Image: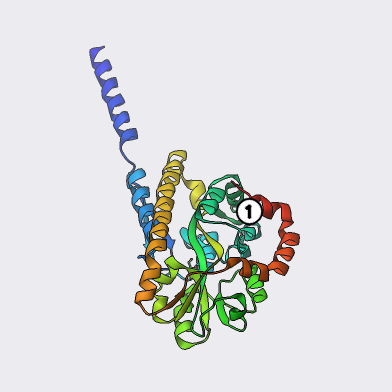
Amino acid sequence: MRFVRSALSVAAATFATLIAAPSLAQETLKLSLAIGQNSHYGVAVDVLAKEVEKRTNGRYKIQNFYSGALGAEREAIEGVQLGTIDLTMTSSGPIPNFVPETAILDIPFLFRDYDHARRTLDGPIGQELLTKFPSKNIQALAWGENGFRHMTNNKRSVNAPDDLKGLKMRTMENPVHMQAYKQFGIIPTPMAFTEVFTALQQGTVDGQENPLSVISAAKFVQVQKYITLTGHVYSPALILMNKAKWDKLSPADKQAFNEAVKEAIKANRARIDDDERRVVGELKAGGMTVVEVVDKSKFQATLQPTFVEFGKKFGQANIDKIRNYK
Ligand code: EAX
């Protein structure tokens, strides 16, 4: 009897050890980034990798590939969709080509400020849009941030909308941006981000538009003379994962990933807050002419015909719901 009991307790102890011990199975996931490590995305995906490893007891590791080493943003999204890349952090630029519903967020002058944008994306409007991804084989883990975009070029100082006329500007492969920028009189030239520095350097395009965080990370100060703080559009970002990979995770691991993603987004936004305070000084020191005071109402007025078209396309009520979100 005594023997049986102790044999049983040994068996129980062994079983307990087996289920408590971290499983040895380990998987490394590949994450693609179009911009460099020293950036508002780089800090986010570094935090993501660290937190995922910690919160899954090392069963999942994330290997980050920076600076477009695995391709540009559209290729990364395609890779995530196909499963050849596990994760990406990307701007919303090419996203409407995959999930058209998100295009509403790319409308110029939609968000008043960072607080408005962040609260909208974290709230029901943003969260509802994330549910549009799984049917495209993509799990959208969270909205992140790229930032308010500003115009840079090599031709002239832009003080008013008329100064934009005839400028050949690289744009993202984003239909909403391209439609609006045409209204400014810009000649939009869609191009993958990984090609922009060279295009600016060689004069293939006169300018481009991006948030201060990107302008700094990509060192555009070396190839651009003028910047105007137009803040003409807010640029969201996303952390995306291959859906089959996501579905394979246990409920506990899904929670671990979600918590890690939250930390990553915090780091992403904190770095942008920091860049917003720091980068204008850096650009001036680098010799750029910075137009800081901009009458945004003039730029908005120029876009009026496009706003009417967007109202028809997306539903004016849907646009107003975002504009007025508190
Ligand atoms: O996602 O393509 C772009 O201009 C993006 O803003 C940049 O790559 C960061």
- Residue drawn at (48%, 84%) of the image: 154
- Residue drawn at (58%, 62%) of the image: 95
Q: Quadrant of residue 276?
A: bottom left
Residue underneath mark 1 = 323
x and y percentages locating residue 171 in the rendered image: 56, 74
Give the left or right position of residue 122, taking residue 198 as reference: right
Above or below for 129 versus 288 = above
Q: Quadrant of residue 67?
A: bottom left
Above or below for 311 versus 34 = above
Q: Is residue 92 visible?
A: no
Nearer to the camera, 18 or 152: 152
Nearer to the camera, 309 or 74: 309
Nearer to the camera, 277 or 217: 277
- Residue drawn at (39%, 53%) of the image: 267
Above or below for 208 versus 19 = below
x and y percentages locating residue 84 in the rendered image: 48, 63
Nearer to the camera, 228 or 107: 228
Q: Quadrant of residue 216?
A: bottom left
Q: Which amino acid, mark 1?
A: Arg
Q: Which quadrant: the N terminus? A: top left
- Residue drawn at (61%, 75%) of the image: 161
Q: Is residue 103 visible?
A: yes
